[in-house]
Amino acid sequence: ENKRPKKEKKKKEKTKKEKPRKETENIKKSSKKDNVKKVKQKKKKSVFKIILIIMFILCIIGLLGIGAFFGYIIYTAPEFTEQNLYNKEATFLYDIDGEEFAKIGTEIRQKVKYEDLSESLIDAIIAAEDSRFFQHSGVDLPRFIKASISQVLGKGGGGASTLTMQDSKNSFTSTEDEGIKGIIRKFSDIYISVFKIETHYTKEQIIEFYVNSNYLGGGAHGVEQASLNYFGKSAKDLN
């Protein structure tokens, strides 16, 4: 009988000793888990910071690249002058009675004023070439974006040039459409159209530039000469 309580006492003492051991082990395990979590969180934060820094650097490089590109466009863009639109005009020869009997030169052209164009001709040009001509300021942005997306997708995408941009392209830049040269040419046309033409000339003058500068076949430059060649009448009489 006396032996039993002693054994029970020993068991109780053992359980008492085991309890704090288990508690310390549990504390150690939980602290290890917390440390692992903290380390993982720190790693995540450091990775996130690195990604942010890389993105920030790339944004700065991108902005610098865009700035350099537009700086190049502005620096290399030719100066738009009305005189340079018609730098190869024809020479008219007259007889002793003042009658014209010949035209010589590389570009046979007779210039025409806006007020001397028929309404039918003006409406036809606007409808075919630039339907929002009187609304935009040199660039038809929705049309330009649509054409750019079509080009990226390989579906063509021509026809983004406004009448103003065509004035620039036909006489001052080039007709290059492919590669980096094509991109530079297009943005040069945009810059010239918005800042050199639309800000200094009226819409009526821009239409004058367009109808007088284009080559229309048969040796005729401009609508007046083409009208005389093809229809035997002045551009003001076209219907």
Image (cartoon, rainbow, N blue to C red):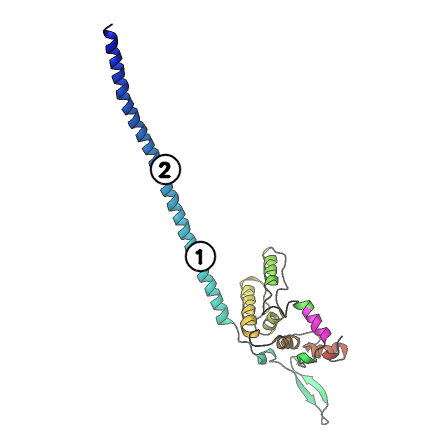
**Is residue 228 something that shows in the picture?**
no
Mark positioned earlier in the residue sequence (2 or 1): 2
The numbered mark at residue 44 is none
Q: Quadrant of the N terminus?
A: top left
The numbered mark at residue 37 is 2
The numbered mark at residue 59 is 1
- Image side of residue 183 versus residue 53, left or right: right
Q: Quadrant of the C terminus?
A: bottom right
Identity of the amino acid at label 1? Cys
Q: Residue at x 56, y 64 (%)?
A: 182
Which is more toward the observer, 1 or 160?
1
Q: Is residue 79 magenta?
A: no
Instruction: Give percent across and percent down for residue 9.
Output: 25, 14
Instruction: Give percent across and percent down for residue 236.
Output: 73, 79
Disc 2 element: helix
Which is more toward the observer, 213 or 41?
41
Q: Residue at x 41, y 56 (%)?
A: 57
Identity of the amino acid at label 2? Lys
